[in-house]
Amino acid sequence: MFTIEGNTVHFFLKSFAEGAGFNVYVAIVFFLLWFFFCAIEYGIAVPAGLFFPGLLIGASLGQFVGLFLFEVGIISNEKMLSAINVYATIGGVSVLTGYTRLSFCLAVLFMETTQNVNLFIPMLLGILFSRGVGNLIIPSLYAFALNLKHVPMISHRISRRAKFFEAQEVM
């Protein structure tokens, strides 16, 4: 399970459909390990990707939520297989949206990956929620990194100085 990231994503998103088991403790340990490793990797500036680790963190967190709802009794036994895959998919998309602020392209990418049109609306709701919460808390990870490296970016708003010079040119 801790081998190649692509195999791990396949395990999270397809394992229940194939009859493989998964428990709550493995999901939470997997989440904590990947979160810790991802934070260390980004903190020491190792040139490695953040897309798949974010997907794995979100998928394990979503699978943990799905398994928890099953243990509590909210999800019935016959719906368990498909529901936990849905929670894992929406969790992966939501975590990726939370720190990258990608929106519609992630929904289309995951809809094509899972080949399930029925997941499109729940993914969009997860994307909207995580993007809104992320915008309230902190800027995107990539904007934050560009700011730390002092890379100039065009702002969404015009500064007061630019408005002043624009008014002077009109006169």
Image (cartoon, helix red, strand yellow):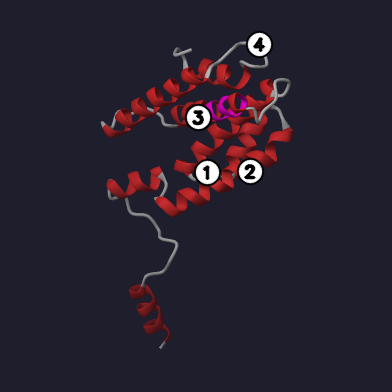
Mark 3 belongs to which amino acid? Leu
Point out the tag, 3 or 2, that comes first from the N-terminus: 3
| Foreground: disc 3 or disc 1 | 3
Residue pictured at 37% horizontal, 70% vertical: 159
| Foreground: disc 4 or disc 2 | 4
Label 4 sits on residue:
19
Residue range highlighted in magenta: 64-70
Residue pictured at 49% horizontal, 21% vertical: 27
Mark 4 belongs to which amino acid? Gly
Tell me the SS state at disc 1: loop
Residue pictured at 46% horizontal, 31% vertical: 54
Crowd tier of the residue under label 4, counting other residues whose Cα lies within 10 Å: few below 14, some 14–19, many 20 or above = few
| Foreground: disc 3 or disc 2 | 3
**Residue 124 drawn at (x, y percent):** 63, 43
Identify the mark at residue 163; answer none if there is no mark.
none
Point out the tag, 4 or 1, that comes first from the N-terminus: 4
Label 2 sits on residue:
124
Quadrant in the picture for residue 110: top right
Label 3 sits on residue:
61
| Foreground: disc 2 or disc 1 | 2
Label 1 sits on residue:
102
Q: What distance separates the C-alpha of mark 4 from that of mark 3?
A: 20 Å
Q: What distance separates the C-alpha of mark 3 from that of mark 2?
A: 18 Å
Residue pictured at 73% horizontal, 34% vertical: 117
Q: In this view, does 67 lie to the left or right of 77?
A: left
Tags 3 and 1 touching, CB below 8 Å: no
Point out the tag, 4 or 3, that comes first from the N-terminus: 4
Tags 2 and 1 touching, CB below 8 Å: no
